[in-house]
Image (spheres, coloured by chain):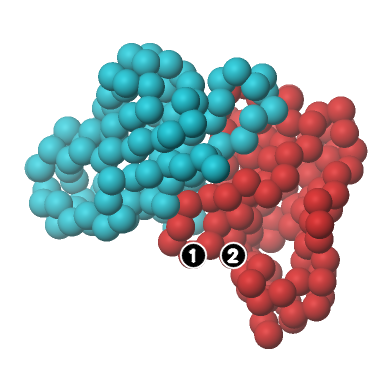
Amino acid sequence: SQQGEEDPQALSIQEGENATMNCSYKTSINNLQWYRQNSGRGLVHLILIRSNEREKHSGRLRVTLDTSKKSSSLLITASRAADTASYFCAPKGFNKFYFGSGTKLNVKP
Amino acid sequence: DVKVTQSSRYLVKRTGEKVFLECVQDMDHENMFWYRQDPGLGLRLIYFSYDVKMKEKGDIPEGYSVSREKKERFSLILESASTNQTSMYLCASSSGTGGMNTEAFFGQGTRLTVV
């Protein structure tokens, strides 16, 4: 399976701190995507990084990709209480999206 | 904005009932997906459809079937609901013409309880 595995499973930080989540995968990919899920809702796309890219930024989000290690990280800088959610990576080979169990982030005000 | 709409937010059904979960997208996407999400197991792909009347099994198709008669609508069918199918069901769609670098758009989810 192309399923990504996120680490840690849960992360609790104070507002204003940075949050780092990691993703490992097993197969070759065309791109890797990160999604966010607020409690009990559908997933929302955050950012996509292509296999030939090493780093990408979008607002307070920074994503890195190391294809030699088959790993990616998502950094959220200056976190806010509203960032509290679960975050999933989706390594993408072809048409399908595979998701892991996610990292549950709790940002305390 | 892409909109993916699932017919019900919450659903309670009895064991043995035939259950239909409906999903409609309004962006002419070729690809549509059904996932179930359970605590500790993440999202698992049940079925995938890449065109009208075309489907592919995902990782956990047992006990489910799907129907895609029109491009915008993808239905998940539980032939005979069982308590172990109690879960959150998520529908998603994505463009098939944008190459590999397309994103998935999700519905709001249906929380199904089988009693």
Q: Which residue bears the numbered disc 1?
A: A39
Nearest to the observer: residue A22 or residue A58:
A58
Spatial separation of the CA atoms under disc 2 and disc 1? 6 Å
Q: Mark 1 lies on which chain?
A: A
> In which image quadrant can residue B100 be found?
top right
Q: Looking at the rendered structure, which numbered label has been put on residue A65?
A: none
Q: Residue at x 74, y 57 (%)?
A: A21
**Residue A11: horizontal and vertical position, in percent?**
68, 69
Task: Using residue B74 as the reference point, say whether residue A26 is left or right of it.
Answer: right
Q: Point out the image quarter for the N terminus of chain A.
A: top right
For residue B62, above or below residue B17: above
Contact flag, marks 2 and 1 (Cβ < 8 Å): yes
Give the letter of the red chain. A
> In which image quadrant can residue B95 be found?
top right
* SS of the residue under disc 1: loop
> In which image quadrant can residue B18 be found?
top left
For residue A40, above or below residue A44: below
Q: Residue at x 56, y 37 (%)?
A: B104
**Residue B30: horizontal and vertical position, in percent?**
48, 21
**Residue A18: horizontal and vertical position, in percent?**
82, 69
Q: Which residue bears the numbered disc 2?
A: A85
Q: Which of marks 2 and 1 is nearer the N terminus?
A: 1
Q: Which residue lies furthest to the bottom in this view?
A: A109
Task: Using residue A95 as the reference point, say whether residue B61 is left or right of it.
Answer: left
Q: Mark 2 lies on which chain?
A: A
Give the letter of the cyan chain. B
Badge 1: few (under 14), some or many (20 or more) residues near its Cα, within 10 Å? few
Q: Which residue lies furthest to the front in this view?
A: B1
Q: Point out the image quarter for the C terminus of chain A.
A: bottom right
Amino acid, disc 2: Ala
Please say whether residue B7 is visible from this viewpoint: yes
